[in-house]
Amino acid sequence: MNWIKIDEAAKITGITKRAIRYYEEISLIQPPERSDGQVRLYTDEDIKQLKRVVDAKEVLGFSLQELQHFLSIKERVLEHKDQYESTKDTTIQQSELEEIAVGLKEQEKMLQHKMEKMKSFQGELKDLIQKVDSLLNL
Amino acid sequence: MNWIKIDEAAKITGITKRAIRYYEEISLIQPPERSDGQVRLYTDEDIKQLKRVVDAKEVLGFSLQELQHFLSIKERVLEHKDQYESTKDTTIQQSELEEIAVGLKEQEKMLQHKMEKMKSFQGELKDLIQKVDSLLNL
DNA sequence: GACACCTTTGACGTTTGCGTCATAGTAAAG
DNA sequence: CTTTACTATGACGCAAACGTCAAAGGTGTC
């Protein structure tokens, strides 16, 4: 395995060491392995997870709370699926699943809306760039 | 003209009165007209501007600071354009314009990047929705 | 094994983006 | 012209997301 320490993890993900520890503190990411001396050791998988959190935060504009919420939903859905496939014992309530479905669909709609607004804003940006460029080429 | 007071403005834009005053305080929006008794009176144009700020913040995930930056750039570009068209006297430095152009192009690239990440996240969301739906239709 | 350079935990500090009073003035209705 | 419902300004409060010490211990290397 390729273990790295927090400093390198920070450099790879582009966030600070403090932020990484903070994300662990609020259970946004799985606690990584530790050395005998309590030093955090990250695997490639840990780094991937971290990158996803960073993306979701910076790119999608999710708050850490929203992220936690989404991650827990995803986990529960996957858990439920496993449960069903292995034992046919549906322990998660139907009503709960329906609630989750509604929430997810809402999220997707919002995302669609965001992307459309982004496109129009991008158009505006391109316009402005055009103007500046034409001013430069006189 | 169709003047409205802050309460209606808040209802139309979907943000609070406090937020509107705050945006004015940090110069994110133009101060609206006032009545003799110092009461803020908003026009349709003011409302449009407010809506744009709200969009940029909530939809594009810009911080208010980033927004201020973008707005000031835009203003300066348009000012410069007017100047050029009216007097042919190019008072804004070439170098400054080039800097602005670079900044804008960077912004556009970042936006592009964001949109791509959003698409892939949307795919993930759709997957998850599929799974939940299939669990519901058993 | 001594040295320089990490890391950890804990705790307090800071910024952003408003919320929430309190106090005083304003607008419109009756 | 009084009442009732907004509004303005100022000031303090607050949660989120870290920043920034400080103190103590771990790690690699010469």
Image: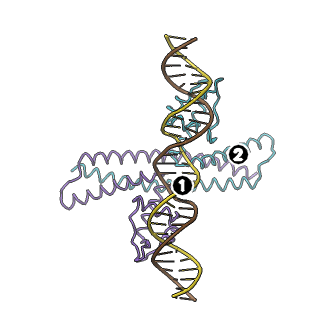
Chain colours: A purple, B cyan, C yellow, D brown
Left or right: B123 as drawn, with respect to B136: right
Kindly report which numbered mark, 1 or 2, lies closer to the viewer in this rendering.
2
Q: Residue at x 45, y 56 (%)?
A: A56
Q: In the image, residue B14 lies at what x, y percent?
A: 49, 36
- Camera-side residue: B122 or A26? A26
- Chain hosting mark 2: B
> Mark 1 = which residue?
B112
Q: Earlier in the sequence, mark 1 or mark 2?
A: 2
Helix, strand or loop status at disc 1: helix
- Camera-side residue: B87 or A66? A66
Q: Residue at x 70, y 43 (%)?
A: B78
- Chain hosting mark 1: B
The disc placed on residue B76 is 2
Q: In the image, residue A113 lies at what x, y percent?
A: 46, 44
Amino acid bearing label 1: Gln
Amino acid bearing label 2: Arg
Q: Residue at x 56, y 40 (%)?
A: B52
Left or right: A20 as drawn, with respect to B105: left
- Give neighbour class at mark 1: few <14, some 14-19, many 20+ (Cα, 10 Å): some
